[in-house]
Image (spheres, rainbow, N blue to C red):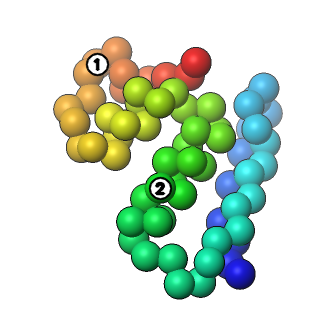
Amino acid sequence: MDKITYTRGTYSKEAQKVELEVREDMDIHDFKILCKRLAASLGYSYKSIEEAFENKTVSKDNKQILKD
């Protein structure tokens, strides 16, 4: 079992550490889903995650981190 760990460098009211255990045989499509889940667990909004992963043009207002 492999792990992907994110540790926040500064204090925030959001999660400080997220650790995900993943299969060793994970393909790139599963990895994309995992990255989306990691972003959601860190507080990014669904809209900003979808924009980032669909290569849409990011509007000026959405260049900042969007959180619900």
Position of residue 32 relative to residue 13, above or below, is below
Taking the spot 34% from the left edge, 15% from the top edge, the residue there is 61
Point out residue 27 in the picture as x, y percentages from the top left corner: 43, 76
Label 2 element class: helix
In the rendered structure, the answer to whether residue 10 lies left or right of residue 4 reads right
Check residue 39 in the rendering and tell me which mark sits there, or answer none: none
Q: Locate residue 28: give its quadrant.
A: bottom left
Position of residue 60 relative to residue 21, above or below, is above
Q: Would residue 66 be visible to someone looking at this image?
A: yes
- Total labels: the figure holds 2
Label 1 element class: helix
Viewer-closest of 68 and 17? 68
Q: Nearer the viewer, mark 2 or mark 1?
A: 2
Point out residue 20 in the picture as x, y percentages from the top left corner: 70, 61
Q: Which of marks 2 and 1 is nearer the N terminus?
A: 2
Taking the spot 51% from the left edge, 27% from the top edge, the residue there is 45
* Alpha-carbon span between mark 2 and mark 1: 26 Å
Q: Would residue 9 be visible to someone looking at this image?
A: no
Q: Locate residue 13: give its quadrant.
A: top right
Point out residue 48 in the picture as x, y percentages from the top left corner: 41, 30
Residue named by callout 2: 33
Residue named by callout 1: 60
Q: Residue furthest left?
A: 57
Point out residue 37 in the picture as x, y percentages from the top left corner: 57, 48
Position of residue 60 relative to residue 54, above or below, is above
- Residue type at mark 2? Ile
- Residue type at mark 1? Lys
In the rendered structure, the answer to whether residue 50 lies left or right of residue 10 reads left
User: Is the Cβ of the residue at disc 2 closer than 8 Å to that at disc 1?
Assistant: no
Viewer-closest of 14 and 28? 28
